[in-house]
Amino acid sequence: MFIADIRKDFYEVVANQRVVLLVAPDIDALCACKILQALFHCDQIQYTLVPVTGWQDLGTAFLEHKEQFRYFVLINCGANVDLLEMLQPDDDSIFFICDTHRPVDVVNVYNDTQIKLLIKQDDDLGVPSYDDIFRDEDEEGEDSGNESDEGSEPSGKRRRFDEGAVERRIERQRAKREWEARRREILFDYEQYEYHGTSAAMMFFELAWVLTKDTKDMLWWAIIGLTDQWVHDKITNMKYVTDIATMQRHVSRHNHRNEDEENSLSIDCMRISFEYDLRLTLYQHWSLYESICNSCYTSCSFKLWTLNGQKKLQEFLADMGLPLKQVRQKFNSMDMSIKENLRDVIEESSNKYGMKDIRIQTFGVHFGFKNRFLASDMVHATAALLESAEKDDSETDNFIKALDALSRSNIDRLHSGIELAKKKLIAIQQTVASCLCTNLILSQGPFLYCYLMEGTPDVKLFSKPMALTLLCKYLLKAFVLSTRNKRCKLLPLVMAAPKDVEKGTVIVVGIPPESETSDKKNFFGRAFEKAAESTSSRTLHDHFDTSIIELKTEDRSKFLDALITLLS
Amino acid sequence: MDPSEVEFLAEKELVKIIPNFSLDKVFLIGGDLGPFNPGLPIDVPVWLALNLKQRQKCRIIPPEWMDVEKLEEMRDLERKEDMFTPVPSPYYMELTKLLLNHASDNIPKADEIRTLVKDIWDTRIAKLRLSTDSFISQQEAYAKLDNLTLMEINTIRAFLLDTLNCMYKLRSNVQ
């Protein structure tokens, strides 16, 4: 059931209770969790935070806590499956779900008692209407009741009645079959494509705003949640721009007080500003040259894996009049004269090289004298911390470290995250370059396929879902720009990488085809399920995104064949 | 005494806040905390003010002495005089630190205030050092220092007492 008034139906319900927060491992969920934690601290609401990495984790966590807790808040997990069937809770457990995964399972939408969805109802959901899917069972009983009555009538009239009754019964059965066929069709259409809705962090920020407890910290976290959806390509450009406009209104409201010259704020206060900044990842914490080489947009536009591309890059830098020595040193040490007009200069030159969208609307934060970050910097740093492939750290440790990095008091952790993110980006670019140069991407008919061998450098980084998805997207963009085959440009990409060498599994990810106006709807979730069923491959559909699965290495080829037959 | 203990004592000072909630009178061992009404200023101890501020339940109003012009005057006066001048508040250093760390968005010109208070503190500590130096070198038996705050005394207490003890031992051994 959708919640109408988030303050009355959610916050005031949990106000004097203890709650369990079950949080999925993505940055948007982390930001939403931070906002909710801050609100709970203000009102001294006791909570238990449990990071969950998949459906099995969710089930285990639920079983552990169901005796002591009645209220469960699920962040970025749980909306797209029938939760009651999966968890089998008692009747008094109540679940508040704030999830960006769509489509929302119909049982979750129409359950009135135990499942409360913290999702706006107009969030382009397209839920089928109740009558189309659920049908009362009473009509069945009437049918059989009538038949038995009429069966006991004396014979003369009986024949006529019988015929009438038989006809009606046939009619009802036909109608029921038709209704069921339509219902299957509607459900199939509804659940076929997987996509994402409004950021969970933004939902909780709105809750904070309604409670008038919103601070700049919470606003910044909401912005990071939104930027995470954009960086990991989960929402369309249109939606991103609309949400940025919403955030911009909040930012102006908070910045209203800074304007007063007489009582200017301390330098330590957080200042969020709207920036129309360059799309170069981490460029303020790196050198400009490295950033251009390792950002997806520029690297793909120049085709930096070819010699020609390198030459074009040198031309580009020469065209802007930037000396190589300046461009290769740390951004903060570049000459002020160059830094001043950098954005405009780069925009002008990139227009000449076919990069029309080198600038993107985003937000930046500024506190203290040294600390300036863009929202996308924070997303990359936190994602690198969350998925760091160190041997000793468990996933919960990584989660807590990433959560800490979002606080203003843990700048060191953030900087270490930025360093890890740089390594990750370099690894991604090198892998993309090597895949393209060695033609590792094969066209299998209805989709493109790429398999990362075990000995590939940095392959451990790509055993994690977010890093692999990012690699997938960059690879597809680069491939589309480098191939001459027109048909291949419209194909989706399936990528596999070794996940666990001891257990012998690979992680498989599928992403939709690359296009300017893509609506980011992914059909691989259902396709993977069906292919696994038909070949009885040993798969684990544990991840909250249904388009990411784990598969035994031996079953790889038959799974692929099944997928090819399914999709052609 | 630990500086944190001095800070703890400083938190008993009263400061004005404007709450945004309402609560009836609260009766605590240390005293009563009067009824809270949204939008009406009320005096509370600093420890409560900071807790409420962190829970976003109030707005802190800076004390009267925490003003750029007044602090500038005090700093200039301190620099002119040889003796210690009267302080704005017996816990001026701790209050500045606490309020500026937690509520700097409610205090106008927070950076300048921080600098001015630090200047006053530096001048007073320098005077303290000079006077201790002359006390020891002239082997005085008695010194009178007015207008010192607990925090300043605390910075020198342990060191001074230990040194005086050592010097006494050295002198008594020589003789």
Image: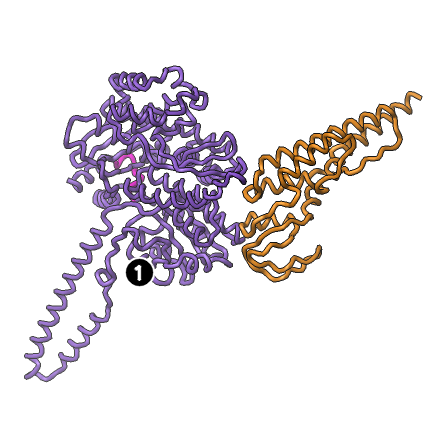
In the rendered image, is residue A407 in sight? yes
Q: Please, which chain is the residue tagged with disc 1 on?
A: A
Q: In the rendered image, which quarter contains the N terminus of chain A?
A: bottom left
Indicate the chain coloured orange by its letter.
B
Q: Is residue A442 magenta?
A: no
Q: Is residue A555 magenta?
A: yes
- Which percent across, then down, holds residue A387? 41, 35
Image-based side of A131 in relation to A394, left or right: left
Image-based side of B122 in relation to A287, left or right: right
Q: How many marks?
A: 1
- Which percent across, then down, holds residue B157? 78, 34
Pick the residue in front: B101 or A502: B101
- Which percent across, then down, holds residue B174? 91, 20
Q: Which residues are magenta?
A: A546-556
Which residue bears the numbered disc 1?
A: A110
Q: Quadrant of residue A308?
A: top left
Image-based side of A407 in relation to A248, left or right: right
Determine the secondary structure under disc 1: helix
Residue pictured at 68% horizontal, 42% vertical:
B7
Pick the residue in front: A295 or A360: A360
Vertical order, A337 against B78 (above or below): above
- Which percent across, then down, holds residue B108? 57, 41
Look at chain A in the picture and name its colour. purple
Image-based side of A242 in relation to B30, left or right: left
